Amino acid sequence: MFAITNSIGMFGMNAFPVTIEAEVTRGAPQFEISGLPDVGIRESRERVRSAFTSIGMQFPKGKVLINLAPADVRKAGSSFDVAIFISLMQATDVLPLRMPHSVFIGELGLHGKIRGVRGVMSMTMLARNNGFDEIYVPMENLKEASVVDKIQVYGVSDVDMLMSHLVDQEVLHPAPLYVPDRKDPLADRMDFKDVRGQFKAKSGIELAAAGGHNVLLIGSPGSGKSMLANRIPTILPEMTHEEVLETSNVYSVAGQLPPDRPLIVRRPFRSPHHTTSGAGLVGGGTIPTPGEISLAHNGVMFLDEMPEFKRSTLEMLRQPLENRKVVISRASGTAEYPCNIMLVGAMNPCPCGYYGSPYHKCTCTEKQIKQYISRISGPLLERFDMHIDVDPIPYEEFASKEPAEDSAQIRERVNFARKQQEKRYAGLNIYCNSMIPDHLLDEFCPMTPQAEKLFSQMYQHYKMSARTGTRIKKVARSSADLNGNEEIDRKDIAVAVQFRGFDSRYLK
Ligand SMILES: Nc1ncnc2c1ncn2[C@@H]1O[C@H](COP(=O)(O)OP(=O)(O)OP(=O)(O)O)[C@@H](O)[C@H]1O
Ligand SMILES: [Mg+2]
Ligand SMILES: [Zn+2]
């Protein structure tokens, strides 16, 4: 008897179809799985056997051969268990030999339980796109699968439930299409209205959000850096549907989707601790999984206390930040994870924390300060278009009863600025000003004569490098977009220069 069952495998972010062929013939008892299986699949033999026992059935006698096709694709993970089990049910005549419209996904556990696997959202999309009518997924993954339309999705918690349905004993109903509620009541618990004063820092953050610029927040302990950074996602534009799916897919593949909320509808905010390993930050492992930078895809990654991170770890961020994707190569293939993020860093200005503070005296030597700053490599520092000084707020601001502007109001201005960028960069694969490539800088950053003049004065006065000049133009572009101007004006240049304080203070 020769049976064929459909399943789906994952490598990195990519789902691919897998056909399970099962053959049971007479002969000495044997159970082989072929088609480049890894250790996990070999272990699945034991799990499949025990699933038979769990429903009181005998494992087929004789020679049992399973082949996973295509053979030349490296398959990993345990998501083929259920399909292998089903193929044996077909090969022993319990189920029809051909079930061409159905796909089976899931790992078998003890006592016939079906356990959740990673990447089910991508798998379900592939199943639909390849024309399948129905997909059976572990109950744990039902929500993320039911995000996909135009395919019937069934959640199953054990093989008994699955078999009862397939032999028409107790028929299951397909899950209703999941439509996310954008008004998640927990989502907006943080708001810029909680931050008193800090007018300059907030306007800097607004500018950064408007152009998608990476920012470095510098300030003494307790001045409010973390508080400001945490709230940045609340002023970024709402995610588009495409972004929601992309980000949710990363979480699905990482096995980090919350089971009750299968779609990530709010821009992520990830704040990895400084002890996080390089692999934890950018992704890795024998079967590559996404790192923090990809879990922040379409959102914010916040590196608090940046100088505390290992220099070598931070270095690993350079390429992904540049390319907006992480590429992990393994003998078994190359996995790619997206990481289109806004990077926000925070640091004290010096080891004691008070260099430049109007209230405390800094007790560090010049050498200590230099050493502290040099913990972050120059090339990484250069990924920040803007440096924002976060000074402690004076008492009047702290005690003020004046309500501060809320995130929704700020977001409206950010949206306005982004709309113009969308129009300007349509079809160019540039989403925001921070992404303008050098060769298009002049075309997209026209200046008024007054702006030109101020820019040249500043450039010479601060002995800027060409790189700094480039940053200033991009940030000035965002300032003009907030003001609704196509041409960059004098005050846009002035604003952008203001947020390069770090260069003049440390790098002279
Ligand atoms: N502008 C502000 N308005 C209201 N509360 C503030 C403000 N700034 C700071 N705070 C209060 O001070 C606390 C400490 O702020 P926060 O943790 O953001 O400082 P920090 O700059 O990150 O400090 P550290 O360098 O120690 O990490 C906040 O939790 C908040 O309660
Ligand atoms: Mg902090
Ligand atoms: Zn100091």
Image (cartoon, grey):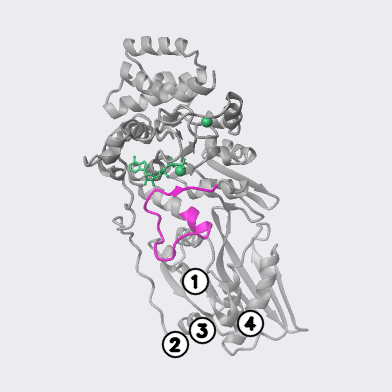
Residue at the spot of label 4: 50
User: In the rendered structure, which disc, 3 or 4, sits on the residue that comes first in sequence?
Assistant: 4
Residue at the spot of label 1: 138
Extent of the magenta region: 249-273
Q: Is 84 positioned to the left or the right of 401 in the image? A: right
Instruction: Name the foreground residue: 164 vs 468.
Output: 468
Q: Is residue 263 magenta?
A: yes
Task: Please say if the residues under marks 3 and 1 sit with CB atoms less than 8 Å apart.
Answer: no
Instruction: Name the foreground residue: 143 vs 225.
Output: 225
Q: CA distance from mark 1 to mark 2?
A: 20 Å
Residue at the spot of label 3: 160
Query: Of the residues shown, which amino acid type is indicated by label 4?
Result: Ser
Name the chief secondary structure element in magenta: loop
User: In the rendered structure, which disc, 4 or 1, sits on the residue that comes first in sequence?
Assistant: 4
Quarter of the image holding residue 495? Answer: top left
Residue at the spot of label 2: 169
Query: Of the residues shown, which amino acid type is indicated by label 3?
Result: Asp
Q: Residue at x 40, y 38 (%)?
A: 223
Please say if 22 is above or below 76: below
* Mark 3 or 2: the one toward you: 3
Q: Residue at x 40, y 27 (%)?
A: 358
Q: CA distance from mark 2 to mark 4?
A: 22 Å
User: In the rendered structure, which disc, 2 or 4, sits on the residue that comes first in sequence?
Assistant: 4
